[in-house]
Image (cartoon, rainbow, N blue to C red):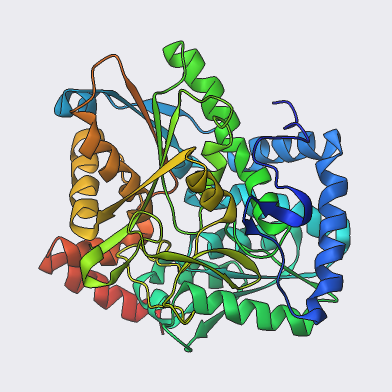
Amino acid sequence: MTKPPEHSPWAPGPDGYYGDFGGSFTPEILHETLAELRTAFDSAWRDPEFWNSYVELMAMYAGRPTPVTYCENLTQRFGGARIYVKREDLNHTGAHKANNVMGQGMLVQRMGKKRVIAETGAGQHGVATATMAARLGLECTIYMGEVDIARQHPNVFWMKQLGAEVVAVTEGTRTLKDAVNACLRDWADSMDDTHYVLGTACGPHPFPQMVTYFQSIIGHEARRQMLDAVGRLPDRVYACVGGGSNASGIFAGFLDDSAVELIGVEAGGKGIATGLHASRIAGGQGRPGVAQGYKTLFLQNEEGVMQDTYSVAAGLDYIGIGPMLAHLHQKGRARFESVTDAEVIEALRVTIRNEGIIPALESSHAFAAAFRAASSLSSDEVILINQSGRGDKDIFTVADALDDDDWKNFIRRKSTEYGR
């Protein structure tokens, strides 16, 4: 795979802005550390050998390229567009998260730092970071909201086995946004020897650009694979959106192709009207603001107070959205929808029963939105869904949702045993 061009369509403008969104708004104590990171990343960005080494590492260690799967049974079930899935669940550690963390790990080595920290919601980023740290011989601390720890215990178990310290965050809503805040506090106190492996395409510059750079490997692969498999590009590309790293990654491969519609799918939770959701754009409730080091659309009230978020998927209940995605929405290049928890669980069930594929609850949002549209499209049209991860981690939540008492009792008993 060739190196992404320096002037990629997803590269930000001066000072890390994507139109009106992005930038860097951080305490003065972090300015020098971020400047160091920007210098290191800019050097890597301009070095063709760095990208080649990254692609080689991901092939050797993570199993890339991940395949694109034609879902014949789902296509027949819905009777409309042909459905293809980009299988990031087959990436090492079971999700797209490894793409970003292994790339940032290579930067850590360039900078000579010895410790990494990370936030995690669904736990996939935490597992990936702990895996990277074990591989590269780095100390590792993972911050995770107390609520997310309770519902993502398998990932917590593996993080600990990989040698990471897992710190439960008990402030605020005890979910992803609070884990981000905890990470930023740690980094301010430990920046001399520590790198913050931010997990999504948010935060202060250069994180949105850097995360998109590493995740763009998804889009570059998918574009080539669709041309090989179908002979043309897809009509629509669907991806779930929390902060937006998997969506930014797959969209990056198609931004120059105006005929390809890019659709981000947010967490509709219990329904927009209930207030129990994390839909910033599709719900029309996101307001421009500055928080956690950058400017974007946040779920906040008129006074700028951040609102609580909710989703059945721990990785999607975030208050903001990546600045690149906010910009793509603003200029009409990407469209955003939301799906409810009920639609997500049904999409997961249908996918498992018809294709033997188990998407993560986060990814199932993209499946649900695609399924909603598929039957209204012609058989000449092609849909590509980015399956950002696999659903092993969601077994507790899904068992509850499906009301399977035998499994719920078994899982809770084992969860208690593992937690000792």
Residue situated furthest front in the rendering: 302
Task: Give the side of residue 386 with respect to residue 49, left or right.
Answer: left
In the rendered image, the vertical position of residue 228 relative to residue 195, given as above or below:
above
On the question of residue 12 being in view, the answer is yes
Q: Residue at x 60, y 30 (%)?
A: 220
Q: State the residue in front, 235 or 358.
A: 235
Image quadrant of residue 294?
Answer: bottom right
Which quarter of the rendering shows the N terminus? top right
Image quadrant of residue 136?
Answer: bottom right
On the question of residue 245 being in view, the answer is no
Q: Residue at x 24, y 40 (%)?
A: 351
Total marks shown come to 0
Task: Give the side of residue 397 with respect to residue 360, left or right.
Answer: left
Q: Position of residue 184 (x, y in %)?
A: 66, 78
Q: Position of residue 256 (x, y in %)?
A: 59, 27
Q: Position of residue 14 (x, y in %)?
A: 78, 51
Q: State the residue in front, 121 or 9.
A: 9
Q: State the residue in front, 270 or 159.
A: 270
Q: Residue at x 55, y 49 (%)?
A: 327
Task: Give the side of residue 92 with respect to residue 374, left or right.
Answer: right
Residue situated furthest bottom in the rendering: 171
Q: Position of residue 11 (x, y in %)?
A: 70, 43
Q: State the residue in front, 384 or 321.
A: 321
Which quarter of the rendering shows the C terminus? bottom left
